[in-house]
Amino acid sequence: MPSERRVRLHQVAREFKVGQTTIIEFLEKKGFKVENSPSSFIGPDAYSVLEKEFGGNRTGETVNILSLIHISEPTRL
């Protein structure tokens, strides 16, 4: 995950197929402070820890969340 990118808690939960509360509790045990709100941002360091722990929950059908937040160039008419 590029260092300038942050994703929201609900997006990470959906990507890893894990509940938001589970993610919050896990990150707090690892020393990360996360607000208990679906729109809270997950930083790159926390995302890496989550990916190591819950990355195996993904399936081939899951869309990579990073591709969803890619900013494309504006379309010209």
Image (tube, helix red, strand yellow):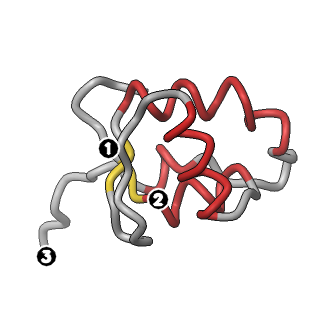
Q: Give whichever of discs 3 and 1 has the lower sequence position.
A: 1
Distance of label 2 from label 1 (alpha carbons): 10 Å
Q: Do the numbered discs 3 and 2 sit on residues whose CB atoms are within 8 Å?
A: no
Residue that label 3 marks? 77
Query: Is label 2 in contact with label 1 (beta carbons under 8 Å)?
Result: no
44 w.r.t. 60: above or below:
above
> Percent from the top left, x then y, of residue 77?
13, 76
- Vertical placement of 17 versus 28: above or below? below
Secondary structure state at the residue bearing disc 3: loop
Tell me the SS state at disc 2: helix
Give the residue displayed 49% in from the left and 47% down from the top: 67
- Amino acid, disc 1: Arg
Check residue 6 in the rendering and tell me which mark sits there, or answer none. 1
Residue under numbered circle 2: 9
Residue 54 placement (x, y as % from top left): 74, 37
Q: Position of residue 73 (x, y in %)?
A: 19, 53
Q: Quarter holding the N terminus? A: top left
Give the farthest residue toward the bottom. Answer: 77
Front one among 29 and 61? 29
| Residue shown at the point (19%, 66%) measured from the top left | 75
* In this rendering, the label closer to the viewer, 3 or 2: 2
Amino acid at circle 2: Leu
Instruction: Give neighbour class at mark 1: few <14, some 14-19, many 20+ (Cα, 10 Å).
Output: some
User: Of the residues tagged 3 and 1, which is closer to the observer?
Assistant: 1
